[in-house]
Amino acid sequence: MKKALSIMLLSILALSLFASGSKEEGTEIYFLNYKPEIAEVYENEVKPAFEAENPGYVLKVVTAASNQYQTTLRSELAKSDPPVIFQVNGPVGIQENVDNVAPMQDMDFYALLADKSMALSLDGNVVAVPYAVEGFGIIYNDAIMRAYFALPDKAVSITSAEEITDFETLKAVVEDMTAHKDELGIQGVFASTSFAPGSEWRWTTHLINPALQAEFGDRATVFSSPTFDFAYNENFRAIFDLYLDNSVTAKGLVASKADADSMAEFALGQCAMVQNGNWAAAQILGQAGVKVAEEDIKFLPLYMGLEGEKNKGLNIGTENYLSINRNASSEAIEGADVFLTWLYSSETGKKLVSQSLLFITPFSSFSADEMPDDPLARQVNLWMNKDGITSVDWVFQGIPSEQWKADFAQAMLEYINGRNSWDDVVSTAQSAWAREAEIAGR
Amino acid sequence: MDKSLRKYFPLFALPALLCFTVSFLIPMVWGAVLSFCSFSTITNAEFVGLSNYVRAFTIDNYFTSALLFTLAFTVVTVITINILAFALALMLTRGIPCTNAFRTIFFMPNLIGGIILGWIWQMIINGFLAYYEKTLLSDSIYGFWGLVILMNWQNVGYMMVIYIAAIQNIPEDMLEAAMIDGANGRTTLFRIIIPSVMPSITICLFLTTTNGFKLYDQNLALTNGAPNHGTEMLALNIFNTFYSRVGFEGVGQAKAVLFTILVALIALMQLYFTRSKEVES
């Protein structure tokens, strides 16, 4: 009996040893993905296609949860099997990962980049290459807008959403639409101003961008500025209040709404407008029971009464840069180059990028007809090439730290809750900037 | 027997000791060392002295406010959880029908993970507050009581089981003697039952105190510290410090060391005071 027992135990031990010994074959390329909305595409389409065409490599894609990328990245980098491809969101991101970014100027992937000035450098080395250009603004449902402009008793003289070119017109239209919301069959003009924890990014990075650009001018100035006056806070407040007062959701309830809720409201036709970027196309069209037609999804710039905004377009830029981890094994780094070059230049890869990942890429390997075929990407393209319109660059990359965004978001939330005056929001934005800039060594 | 025990002790204890050293002792010592360093991964640490500890308090006042919030939360939950659990235990040891079913039901919330509990209660409370056009994040007071309710719901059942076991262990003849001597319910409770279950009260107080201080996942899921850090507890603040800025890993680590010392001190003190009240049966 005892003997049988010990043999059994030994065999279990042996089995478990064998079990841990077997592993997938090939060099592992570990990619830490930033975009949860396309995590499934990487897992279900990109991975099998890449591995089929490149035997000897195993692609491992891990996706960080919304708003948790830096956190996830830092703990993953400390592991013995760290990611080899990771995302940085601009110069601040490079600073955060100064010990990890590898030189990329000799990689085939870098050679694909059409405009080399878009890459980010550190001490004379190229360390981050952008992979997707994106645009954000106010997304609107043209069907609802047409219904509004067909109303006999509308209060504005314009006849289509395309004629909205400044904040005054936008405000007049939105407020009149709210007055007619029952006739239009909507619950509010704007989708919820999402303020659930982790869903504040549409305001703390995107909505602030035109105000930052108006104050500082360009990205480099934002990035080096030790102080922030928030000179255009009244403009910011004007559009922020417009969002809040003409919303699907009552002001007091926005803290229970996530950004996914807002996108669902738009997709289901409960509202006419939502502020977001072209990456949301997949989210809108993938919504179960989607009511908005593909050809009715269009973009308006973020109008907030800034000077010369008639001639300003969407906020177009990128915070999507890929970096290579210099602490990964040389085989993995080589594999990373193989993977990225494959994804952005091979026929299969390019098809995946333009049809499934829906990126507008900055690479010379893509021809004009290989742009993604979703309505918002087409709109971004349209706005980029409009006569007399200049796009607003993504200067928010220069925000000194995540803590500034968090503090600013909380100040706005307290303003919504009625426990902060707008002046408190402004002073928080200023003092937090000064503090964070000092910590960042500006 | 003794001799063979001594002979084989290393063989049997070694695996456990090894695990304990690798997964507890070394990380703990290394963690304390790191709190005096500036680092981004644990392998590139650089000694910076006490500056992390100074920055923990000077950079913003969130750590102190988290400390006060946690203290208030712990005091309230220790009292409510133990009173409720004890009351339930008393009721469920009287032989009323379906006792076992009730015990199981009260214990069940304890089997659900903290994050899920946080989401469940977020929905319930937000659903309730929506009637008044408010949410959990409208005011930190909602978050506070939300957390208290959640914590009670989760922990009362567990503490109840401990109290039930203790109450059932009180010798029947003691209660009978008290009854014959004419003790009323109140006297029996305070003179017989409570002194006899004092060891369990020690355990439950210890558990609820440390649970209150260490609370993290429920806090994260329910409010994530919002609004404006008003419901941020110590553990969450430490985590946020660690990750929200470049170069603040050391500060987070320093806060964590302070946190460990604080919890250990409070737990030991409280253990000492309640132990002295225990009676030998």
Image (cartoon, rainbow, N blue to C red):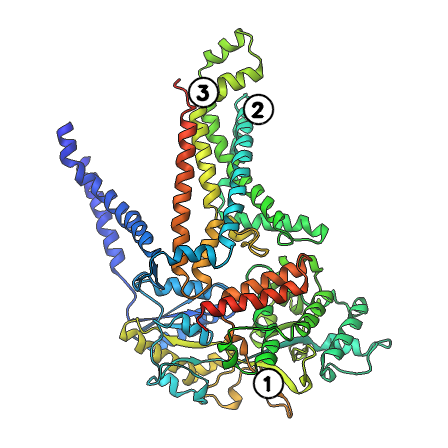
Give the class, few, some or many, for how many residues have Cα within 10 Å of label 2's Cα (few <14, many ≥20): few
In x, y percent, where is residue A177? 78, 72
Quarter the C terminus of chain B occupies = top left
Query: What residue sits right under mark 2 in the picture?
Result: B97
Q: Amino acid at mark 2?
A: Pro
Left or right: A98, with B80 as reference point: left
Q: Nearer the viewer, residue A23 or B171?
A: B171
Q: Earlier in the sequence, mark 3 or mark 2?
A: 2
- Disc 3 from disc 1: Cα separation: 77 Å
Q: Is residue A198 above or below residue A86?
A: above
Q: Marks 3 and 1: same chain? A: no
Q: Nearer the viewer, residue B229 or A370?
A: B229
In x, y percent, where is residue A408? 58, 65
- Disc 3 from disc 2: Cα separation: 25 Å
Q: Chain of mark 1?
A: A
Q: Are the two marked residues, 3 and 2, in contact with CB atoms closer than 8 angstroms?
A: no
Q: Secondary structure at mark 3?
A: helix
In x, y percent, where is residue A167? 72, 78
Give the class, few, some or many, for how many residues have Cα within 10 Å of label 3's Cα (few <14, many ≥20): many
Mark carried by residue B196: 3
Mark carried by residue A391: 1
